[in-house]
Image (cartoon, helix red, strand yellow):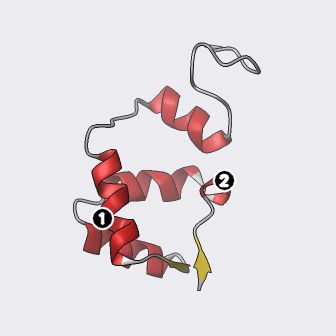
Amino acid sequence: MAKINRNELTKEQIEKALACKTAEELRSLAKAEGFDITKEEAEAYMAEMADVELDEKTLAKAAGGICYMEDCPKHTMAD
């Protein structure tokens, strides 16, 4: 199994990961998608995402590799 490279995740994979409620659920999802994730990595991800909720616009930009930060020097926020 491959290690997860966040730059190669699809929008659908990110949405599924965000929907996971537990680290074990995330590990099961990763395995089903062909990725290897340790219990510690899953727990760290869950802790990181506990206070983060992305709206559809931000999620689409993040999944597409475009900066979603308003002050990004390389990109602008286009509606």
**What residue type is disc 1 on?**
Glu
Point out the tag, 1 or 2, that comes first from the N-terminus. 2
Compare residues 32 and 37 and report the one nearer the observer: 37
Residue extending farthest to the bottom is: 1
Residue 11: percent from the left, percent from the top? Answer: 56, 49
Classify 39 as above or below 46.
below
Query: Looking at numbered disc 2 in the image, what kind of residue is underneath it?
Result: Asn
Q: Mark 2 = which residue?
A: 7
Query: How many badges with numbers are in the image?
Result: 2
Instruction: Return the x and y of residue 28 as percentages of the image width and height.
Output: 36, 78
Quick one: quadrant of the C terminus? top right
Residue that appears at 64% across and 29% down: 67
Which numbered marker is on residue 16? Answer: none
Residue annotated with mark 1 = 43
Q: Position of residue 42 (x, y in %)?
A: 36, 67
Splitting the image into 4 quarters, where does residue 29 fall? Answer: bottom left
In the image, what residue occupies the spot 27% across and 38% down?
51
